[in-house]
Amino acid sequence: MARRREPEGLVELGRITGVWGVRGWVRVQSHTEPRTNILGYRPWHLCRDGHCRPVELAGGRAQGKGIVAHLAGVDDRDAAAALVGATVCVPRSALPEPAPGEYYWTDLEDLDVVNRAGVRLGRVVRVMATGANDVLVVADGTTERLIPFVQGRVIRAVDLEAGRIVVDWEPDW
């Protein structure tokens, strides 16, 4: 799922994708696992075109295959419709520290990817879920590679400090 970088200190957790009902509720696509976890993070910031504003989450729940949420001060369908397309972000400080060997997707984006021979394969432009495992989308300007995020077999090292991932992957694969 492509995600653009939000202002410093904020991490995108979802996107407002539509309206729900006539009382100002919105549909939210959640990037969290499980999807309802997005409702537990505070404060929410709605971001669009690099501009963010804090909003108060007044309520929310799972609805079908998605999430619906009510934001304080958004009390009708027109006000909710104006929010469609905004990303839902939270301060990085609101997220728990990942366990050793676990990473937030946002931390992997923009890292350089090199193979064990030191050949640069590109930069992580996004991470996507495929069901079996997550996949790094790595681009070098001319080529886009899909590299499975399988630690130990394919992913040999993730060095967030150095901004680099070492993979067992050949340039012509």
Image (spheres, rainbow, N blue to C red):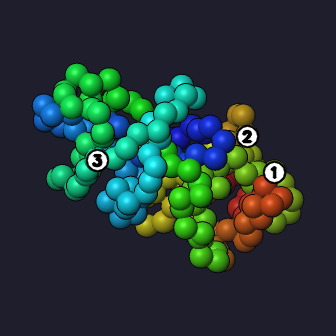
Q: Position of residue 88 (x, y in %)?
A: 44, 42
Query: What is the distance, in whole Å, between disc 1 and disc 2 at their CAs?
Result: 8 Å
Q: Is residue 13 above or below residue 98?
A: above
Q: Nearer the viewer, mark 3 or mark 2?
A: 3
Residue, disc 2: 140
Q: Are marks 1 and 2 in contact (CB under 8 Å)?
A: yes
Q: Mark 2 falls on what kind of element?
A: loop
Q: Earlier in the sequence, mark 3 or mark 1?
A: 3
Residue at far right of view? 118
Residue at x 27%, y 25% (from the top left corner): 79
Residue, disc 3: 58
Nearest the eye: 4 or 147: 4
User: How many residues crowd mark 1 within 10 Å: few (<14), some (14–19), many (20+)?
Assistant: some
Residue, disc 1: 120
Inspect the image, locate mark 1, and give the three-letter code of the amino acid beneath it. Arg
Q: Position of residue 12 (x, y in %)?
A: 51, 46
Inspect the image, locate mark 3, and give the three-letter code of the amino acid beneath it. Ala
